[in-house]
Image (tube, rainbow, N blue to C red):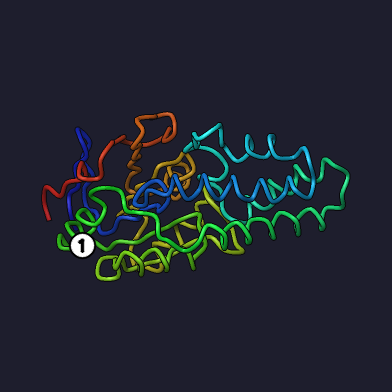
Amino acid sequence: MATIKCRNITFDNIQAILFDKNGTLEDSETYLRSLAQKATRLIDAQIPGTGEPLLMAFGINGNFLDPAGLISVASRRETEVAAAAYIAETGRGWFECLKISRQALDEAEKYIGQTPSPLFVGSLEILKYLREGGLKLGILSAATTEEVRNFVANHQLSDYIQLEMGVDEGPSKPDPVLFLQACQALGVEPNATLMVGDSVGDMQMARNAKAAGCIGITWVGKSDDVRGADVVINQLDEIKIVEA
């Protein structure tokens, strides 16, 4: 059990911390923006006129990526469905729309390549610090489980991360069942577990699962993106162990 302090908020009797991946530990902005732009171009090439509204739906405005937008926080399945809905407005059948959407995202991922997105400054250090402090650590992401595993492997985080969990075919954030499943896998109770994330969905999920607390991280300084957090931080090193 540890006491964790963030700014002026203290969380007692903490055994574990779950982290989101995209936008929390991983600086994935360039990758996600490129993914959305490439997928949009592929869809627009097949169905002219869908490009501009699709980019807006993904949360892309010029070279700006909305950290609260679809491509930033939705699961892969949700992204496919949302894109397919725009395609469906052209009168095509729903299953054809899903196929076009899925294929475009698959092709875009292959085109962009497998170069890992960088960690945010301080991510490795905070994971090492917290793990050495006796806490169990996990990643609970809206990305697929495969993507989470690749992230941990690429950045050699396996010494610090005990749980690599994404969203596959089941429920997605903010469904609290994800947090409950993660806690069960780590062997801890929700009321002894903190959530660190960069989206409203992370906060809602943890709060509805009766987590010990919700820490919102906003690297870009937009506290609205983590509305519902118990405390909002701008750097991960603001998470401190004051008693272990």
- 129 sits to left or right of 111: left
**Above-or-below relation of 115 to 223:** below
**Above-or-below relation of 205 to 52:** below
Which part of the image, by quadrant, shows the N terminus? bottom left
Q: Quadrant of residue 161?
A: bottom left
| Along the viewing direction, whichever of 225 and 14 lies nearer the viewer | 225
Q: Quadrant of residue 90?
A: top right
| Along the viewing direction, whichever of 3 and 104 lies nearer the viewer | 104
Which part of the image, by quadrant, shows the C terminus? bottom left
- Number of numbered tags placed on the structure image: 1
- Please report the residue visible at 56 percent of the width from the left and 48 percent of the height from the top: 74
| Along the viewing direction, whichever of 127 and 32 lies nearer the viewer | 32
- 19 sits to left or right of 40: left
- Please report the residue visible at 69 percent of the width from the left and 58 percent of the height from the top: 102
Q: Residue 60's x, y, as percent? A: 56, 36
- Please report the residue visible at 43 percent of the width from the left and 29 percent of the height from the top: 224
Q: Residue 61's x, y, as percent? A: 56, 32
- Please report the residue visible at 20 percent of the width from the left and 57 percent of the height from the top: 130
Q: Residue 148's x, y, as percent? A: 43, 63
Pointer 1 residue = 131
Q: Residue 214's x, y, as percent? A: 35, 43
Q: Identify the residue at the far left of this view.
A: 243
Dot 1: what SS? helix
Instruction: Classify mark 1: residues with Cα within 10 Å, few (<14), some (14-19) or many (20+).
Output: some
Please name the amino acid that badge 1 sits on. Arg
